[in-house]
Amino acid sequence: MHQKIPERLRDDDFHLIMYSPPPPPDRNTPSTTATVPRRRPSSPRRHHHDTHHQSVVSMTSGRYRQTSDERRFSEDQFDIINNLEYDDVDDGLIDHELVHRNREALVQQLHSSETAYLESLNLVSNVFLQPLRKDAKQSSFAFLGMKKMVCTEREARWLFGNFDEILQVQREILASLERRLRIWGPTQIISDVFHGWFALLNVYQSYLNNYDVAVTTYERLTRYQPFKKFIDSAHKDPSLKGATLLSLLQIPAGCINRYAHLISKLADVTAPMHPDYVGLLTCKQRILQLAEEIKPKVDDADNVDQVLMIHQALVGAPFGVKAQRRLVLQGQLSRLVVNSKSTGEERTYFLFSDLLAIVRPKQDGKRTLLQYKGHITLERARVRALGSEEAGGQEYCIEIVSSYQGVDTLNTTYMGTSQTHILCTNSREEQEEWLKQLETVITNLDRAAAKAKHCMFFLGCVCVKRVPKKLTHLFSLLVAASRRMAQSRSLASEGSIRRLGGSSKASSQSSGSTGGSNTRPGPSSPRR
């Protein structure tokens, strides 16, 4: 028989009873089901209880039996909470924490990369730059022939450029970053530190302008035995960890792109409500603009590295690397023999900014070498596309007529008979691309030659005009004096001739009157 709810239990007391923890079961009473509704049911299967079954809640003051209607009422309340997707975890707080962690990770990545970059710059200065400068100063005071200089001071400037300025700038950048990190927090700003960097990054413009000179100077000095010996000894330094001077000199070329990547990501992960959001967006725009301005120079530095790698792999080439040489195009082409109308073996062609090199790749262990097979000088050359009738049935051919042929080891050209080369491509698109690039290279070479000729003429005129007025006056006086001396000499010679002529005539007359001989007078002495 069911007990009724006491009238002294109000609704508030009912809720307190429902949410109070159940007491331990009494061992003397029959086992009953004590069910307490959960705050967040883990499964909807709890609704399949029999509606006719009655739950019993044990209380310390007595027994309270809950009817099925009251049970259904309490569970409906929790169903409303579940339908509202109630969650006791603050998602906004988690998102804020994730944003802070992302910012923290990017700032730490910037600091670690900056520290590693400065270490590489210090290695260049301590292992290579300072010893070379010290050797150059000591060798300059040594007697001639006593000691061979590793490199001159001028060559050191060509090799390292404004490396000292970059080293000083990066020390200032790292110091400013570390000062800010000492007071770092979730709402700390860092855009003001970045703004102070932008004025210092102009040193990389000068470094990239000198990059081709530095690389070609390094390649030329490695063929000089004292420098090669010094480099081989320096590369054994354990602090380098396998790095070379050339690889360390290539690192500063990518510094601006590294800043653009990290600062842009830091601006992207910063929340709009953060106090540094607007400042980081401004820094992102400035660093991306700087990276876009410097991109042509960075691409040119990459091209210089590719040219150096090709020259280092070349075997038997009669020419060396030049600072002005760039790689324009490369591909697999075959040469058409004009007389036999047959194509030769397919070769690798490298179109540089001043010549077309022909090589054949070969393996030397794990290294790929490029065996030199010839080259075509493109200055004052002519190029055109050939039809299949002119090429003996071969399609997609290009004719190159060189004005002269031959380049010696000193990079000086010598004149020779013009030669005709017919190259076969594999498709119409490839033919058009090679033809376009060849015409561009030839046009640039002819334009540069004409400009150089005009500059030589202009410099000659300027040199004449820049002669000091005192020297010009002195030169005019010397010319006038030489003219007067020449005139005086001519007048003196004429007077002597007249005197000599008069004396000879008088002597002949006296001899004729006294001796009366018919002897023929001899020639006068001045004529003799």
Image (cartoon, rainbow, N blue to C red):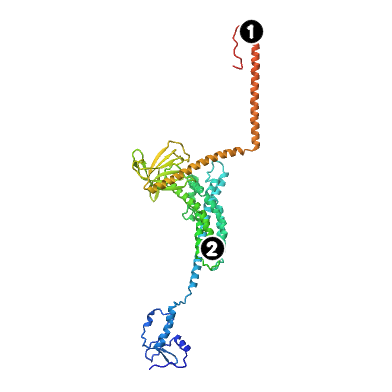
| Amino acid on which disc 1 is placed | Gly
Image position of 286 (left or right of 427): right
Residue 207 placement (x, y as % from top left):
53, 51
Residue lying farthest to the top in this orientation: 516
* Location of residue 131 in the rendering, given as x and y in whole percent from the top left corner: 54, 50
* Residue bearing the label numbered 2: 280
* Residue occupying image coordinates x 66% and y 11%: 506
Say above or below: 126 vs 493. Answer: below
| Total labels drawn | 2
- Vertical side of 256 occupied by 213: above or below: above
Foreground residue, 368 or 471? 471
Q: Secondary structure at mark 2?
A: helix
- Front label number (2 vs 1): 2
The 10 Å Cα crowd at callout 2, few under 14, some 14 to 19, many 20 or more, is many
Q: Quadrant of residue 468?
A: top right
Q: Which residue is mark 1?
A: 512
Q: As shown in the figure, which amino acid type bears the numbered disc 2?
A: Leu
Residue 151 coordinates in the image, percent (x, y)? 53, 46
Residue at 64% x, 27% y is 483
Q: Is residue 69 visible?
A: yes
Question: Above or below — where is 40 with respect to 446?
Answer: below
Residue 92: x %, y % from top left: 49, 72
Residue 190: in sight, yes or no? no
| Side of 505 where 365 appears, left or right | left
| Nearer the observer, 479 or 237 | 479
First in sequence: mark 2 vs mark 1: 2
Compare residues 410 and 19 and report the one nearer the observer.
Answer: 19
